[in-house]
Amino acid sequence: MKKKSKKNNKRGNTNECHNSVLTKTSSPRLLSDNALVHIACLVVLILIIYSNTFNAPFQWDEDEFLVNNPIVSNLHYFANPSDAKGFQYYGHLTERYIGYFTFALNYKMHGFSVLGYHAVNIAIHIANSVLVYLFILLTFRTPFFTINASRFTLYDSRHLIAFFSAILFAVHPLQTEAVTYVFQRFVLLAAFFSLMSITAYVRSRLAEGKQKCLLFYCIALISAVLAMKTKEIAFTLPVVIAVYEFLFFRDTLKRRMLFLAPMLLTLSIIPLTLIYLRGDMSAGEYNLPGVSNVAFSRGEYILTQFRVIVTYLRLLFMPVNQNFDYDYSVFKSVFDPQVILSLLLLSALLGLGIYMIRLSRFEFHAPPSLRLVGLGILWFFITLSVESSIIPLDRLIDEYRVYMPSVGISIAVVTGLFLLKERLQSLKAGKVILTLLVLITGVLAIGTYERNGVWVDKIGLWEDTVQKSSGSAEAHYNLGVAYQNHDMPHKAMEQYLLAVNLRPDYVDAHNNLGVVYKTLNMPDKALEQCLIVIKLKPDYAEAHFNLGSLLYYRMGQTENARRELMTGLRIKPDDQTAQQLMRDISH
């Protein structure tokens, strides 16, 4: 009887601890006050470190995708998308409808004044950071933690874990490409709807009444659909939600599937959109944005991504030598030492995440917060998989691709540091770790502000890029464009020559070189470049226009000018400048 009484007493202590946690959870005032202060800190700090970007110009391909895109400048096409058929980016509109719609709203309000576009991007980044904070707080209220309350030693630190996870995500310099590069709003929006979806899903599972449960679940489902119609990276969202469900909630399989099935059905949205586009596009097969100019095989892309992911991890832990256009080597053999070592490192990291999840389940003495570390590691790999897997993109590495995956790393690192603090059980160690987190936040914030300074003008961005990627023909070409637009033809010519030396078939560089030669009154060299372009790409309309307007017409060769202009207009019939010149020649 004595033994049994002891056992019952032990159980009673466990329940008492569990009830204590629930009692603490129901203390809303202190929780609300802390949350408001933390959110205010997030907002203020983000505004400070991005304060020097509000007037940063459109960079690189934003002129093509936004300024010169008729879809962006007319809301009519969003009410009647079929009317945009025939436009170059009709497929992009269909697949990334929500993102383009926000750009169209920007244009409707203030044209192409850059301040409004940057303000929206920064606002979305703030919202994402707040959602990360709320998501982690909700996670600590899930059944996994409340059931394991007796060994949940980080309860009193949950707000700090949520705050530092959110703030490291918010101020990291690696996010600048997603936030400051206006066109990458697609990444920000896809992350926003994904974070909104998973946060609302968790809230619906924690809701006490049916009405609240249904309300939050509808928000989660609608957000998932909007994410799918914003950018293809959202394809992994239902997978993340399913993993989260099995890690942090306890229920029957039937009830789990009632919650998961509608979410998993959203996986069909992107494939169905592609099938529709391939049947609807009048000219050939439609490709995903970013996969039309791939210069390497699928196998080479996958092998190289092992090394690229390690680079992403290095940048997350040591964000130095950031670059807008990495001159990255393509790896062609699985036996390359760099590929093997990268694969081993990534396998070890993934294995560590899985081990921590299993440890938190099977080992009673292990802290349950290890499961949060494991979730962060799995989150990183799952959310990165779309752009670092079997579908080769035309660029091997881009910093904005780490935006959503970095949430997982932030959660894993911060939770791991707090677990270390608990393990050491020393007040001094706790102060050291908190001080370290504050210092890391400060260093990252300064790094972000400095990195944003590179984006304030086109010449500065591309000079920085060329300095770090001297072997990139694209970087030299874009620096040449920046010089040319700032009326610096000699510097532009130098960069275009470097670009064509690195890549002799670079038609855009040859074409612009021809324009610069004409500006510098070198007609023979200009003619040579135009003919090279037409030989490399006979359907390159701009070369025919340049040959007709810049050379033949000004040289008095009217018939030759008319012939080239007509050839160009057959390729690009909506070019108004060429149409006007044809009318002038006819008169």
Image: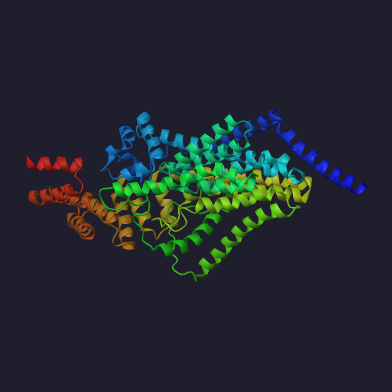
Q: Is residue 360 left or right of residue 461?
A: right
- Vertically, is 11 above or below 507? above
Please indicate, yes or no, whether residue 220 appears anywhere in the rendered image: yes
Residue 404 at x, y percent in the picture = 52, 46
Residue displayed at 30% across by 60% down: 500
Please indicate, yes or no, whether residue 403 appears anywhere in the rendered image: no
Quadrant showing the C terminus: top left
Quick one: 542 or 242, which is closer to the camera?
A: 242
The quadrant in which residue 101 appears is top left
Residue displayed at 77% across by 51% down: 424
Colour scheme shown? rainbow
Quick one: 303 or 255, which is closer to the camera?
A: 255
Q: Residue furthest right?
A: 2
The quadrant in which residue 472 appears is bottom left
Q: Disc count in the image?
A: 0
Residue 539 at x, y percent in the picture = 21, 54
Residue 564 at x, y percent in the picture = 14, 51
Residue displayed at 34% across by 62% down: 502
Quick one: 225 or 504, which is closer to the camera?
A: 225
Residue displayed at 60% across by 50% down: 376
Residue 499 at x, y percent in the picture = 33, 58
